[in-house]
Amino acid sequence: MKSKSSLFVTVIYLTVFSSFSVFGQQTYSYKTGDPANWPKDQDAVSAAPGNHKILLENDKVRVLEVTVAPGEVEPIHHHQWPSVLYVMEAGFFIDRDSEGNVIVDSRQIPEPLTFPLTMYKDPEAPHSVENLSKTITMRLIRVEMKQ
């Protein structure tokens, strides 16, 4: 039961929707909006090519290999389509919006993350992830669903 509740808390903290609170704790606000209005040059592959490698792309999906090296801060970028993420490995990280406001600081998650972990995310407005680990590369596969 503990692993199910840990996964639930993890998904809540990491899923990008609008604003929400978890068990009466801190509320996190995520910028949403119309992906058509987000700057085209901030698409993840264009803005952060060192972190987002296309494994497959067609008119239905785009599959990305995403890596963030220890201590690295990604350039600001967005994801215009809903996605499924398969997170293989990560240490502590901070996700910030385009203005530098903290969206999620994984050090504040009550229970440790368990990997691998799979989650669904709506389109993500411009943001940047900082890998706080000194030894662990964040590694995930992101399947963006275009239709």
Image (cartoon, helix red, strand yellow):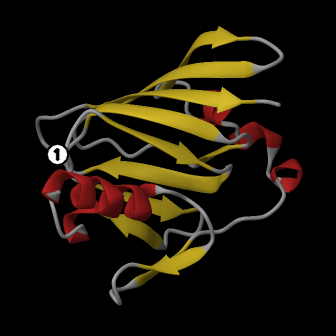
Residue at figure coordinates x 59%, y 19% from the top left: 63
Residue at horizontal 76 percent and vertical 38 percent from the top: 41
> What secondary structure is found at the residue carrying circle 1?
loop
Image quarter of the N terminus: bottom left
Residue 94 lies left or right of residue 63; in this view the side is: left
Badge count:
1
Outermost residue toward the right in this view: 36
Residue 19 position by quadrant: bottom right
Q: Position of residue 37 (x, y in %)?
A: 87, 55
- Residue 112 seen from this side: no
Instruction: Farthest residue to the bottom: give it.
Output: 24
In the displayed structure, does residue 74 sit left or right of residue 38? left
Residue 65 position in % (x across, y down): 47, 20
Image vertical order of residue 63 relative to residue 123, above or below = above
Give the residue number, with chain letter if any, for mark 1. 133
| Front one among 101 and 139 | 139
Q: Is residue 72 above or below residue 142?
A: below
Count residues near mark 1 (Cα–Cα under 10 Å), then give few for <14, some for 14-19, many for 20+.
some
Residue 54 percent location from the top left of the image: 59, 15
Q: Residue at x 38, y 46 (%)?
A: 73
Badge 1 amino acid: Ser
Q: Residue furthest left?
A: 135
The residue nearer to you, when weighing 2 against 121, is: 2
Picture quarter with the C terminus: top right
Q: Nearer the viewer, residue 135 or 22?
A: 22
Residue 32 at x, y percent in the picture:
71, 65
Q: Is residue 99 visible?
A: yes
34 versus 120 height, above or below: below
